[in-house]
Image (cartoon, helix red, strand yellow):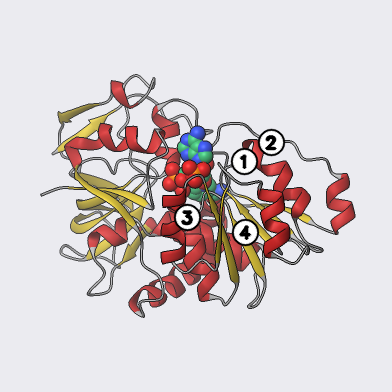
Amino acid sequence: MHAWICDNPIGPEALSWKEVPTPQPRPGEVRVAIRAASLNFPDLLIVQNKYQMKPPLPFVPGSEYAGVVDAVGDGVTQFRAGDAVAAFGGMGGFATHACVDAQLVMPLAPGFAYEDAAAFICTYGTSHHALVDRAELKSGETVLVLGAAGGVGTAAIQIAKAVGARVIAAASSDDKCALCRDLGADATINYASANIRDELKALTGGKGPDVVYDPVGGDLAEPVFRSIGWRGRYLVIGFAQGGIPALPLNLALLKGASVVGVFWGDFARREPQRNAQALGELARWYAQGRIKPVLDQILPMPELQAAFARMGSRQVRGKLVLTNP
Ligand SMILES: NC(=O)c1ccc[n+]([C@@H]2O[C@H](COP(=O)([O-])OP(=O)(O)OC[C@H]3O[C@@H](n4cnc5c(N)ncnc54)[C@H](OP(=O)(O)O)[C@@H]3O)[C@@H](O)[C@H]2O)c1
């Protein structure tokens, strides 16, 4: 098998694509012949040594992938060779094969494309947990999605529309805003050229959004939190801009608003049954055509470094996917 090896976590440029021994699944694991893997922002942070989790070296990055089970370890009864699956294993996906705990594997219904399945679990799982579970977003409420053309952002637009909310999508270019409107956003704000507070005031009749979905952080967080509506819920998803913002807590008091932390990975570990229920609902929505991953580019697996460069330079619209022949 081949795998991208990280033995010096200074960035994607230090990764190397190597032939390595094919691993045997341990008890409770399955081995997946990977057809497609996708990039999530934490994959970039991990190879830069900037993520909270710092795996021992060397490691194979790649948190999420889909493919075909080609071997099962002792004690695995729910999968067998030939099953189509997707997995969020945290590691090992930028390769031709990976062994993963069978409990982290999702079976794929016929018709679920490998490219879509590889781009599904993390972004849709995160946005469903954030909007449906943590914010309890209701039909008719208004949600503002920041970084709305990115991976979790595009999933958030589709899930908010699926529950009947009004979506204001915000992104850094007119092109990205156009993509968000194509995905069903009711209104858009280009925060590189417009004053986001003025736009939010005009778009909500001065009330402010009920829910803010923020995967960007940095200098966007405080102005947006100042604009949130009464009983608003501010979802802390991530800090793609790099800076971790600080919010004046008097604003929470004045708006009766909540700052709500979202950590999907830990939710999935601590509450596996609720996560499985959410993924089941999302798979049904996919089969019904109500949600569909937005694929920015599909590249051959050996072009991982170009994919990382695209993500790091903020060009990605939706998800980047890498495939094996
Ligand atoms: N809390 C959780 O459980 C959870 C789960 C998954 C991901 N996340 C986090 O969510 C964030 C987004 O992840 P993603 O996979 O959706 O990434 P992504 O596809 O790259 O999207 C990130 C968006 O952030 C914006 N951005 C602003 N400044 C940026 C910069 N300096 N570099 C790159 N992007 C920048 C970009 O939109 P504009 O150009 O339009 O500003 C971009 O579309 C990350 O911080 C990630 O760690 C959190």
Q: Is residue 272 visible?
A: no
Residue, disc 2: 245
The quarter of the rendered structure image containing the N terminus is top left
Classify mark 1: residues with Cα within 10 Å, few (<14), some (14-19) or many (20+).
many
Residue, disc 3: 177
Residue, disc 4: 144
- SS assignment at label 3: helix
Rendered position, 41 above or below 188: above
Amino acid marked by disc 2: Pro
- SS assignment at label 4: strand
Answer whether labels 1 and 3 touch (C-beta < 8 Å): no
The mark tally for this picture is 4
Q: Quadrant of residue 116?
A: bottom left
Does residue 58 appear to the left or right of 228 in the view shown?
left
Q: CA distance from mark 1 to mark 3?
A: 19 Å
Classify mark 3: residues with Cα within 10 Å, few (<14), some (14-19) or many (20+).
many
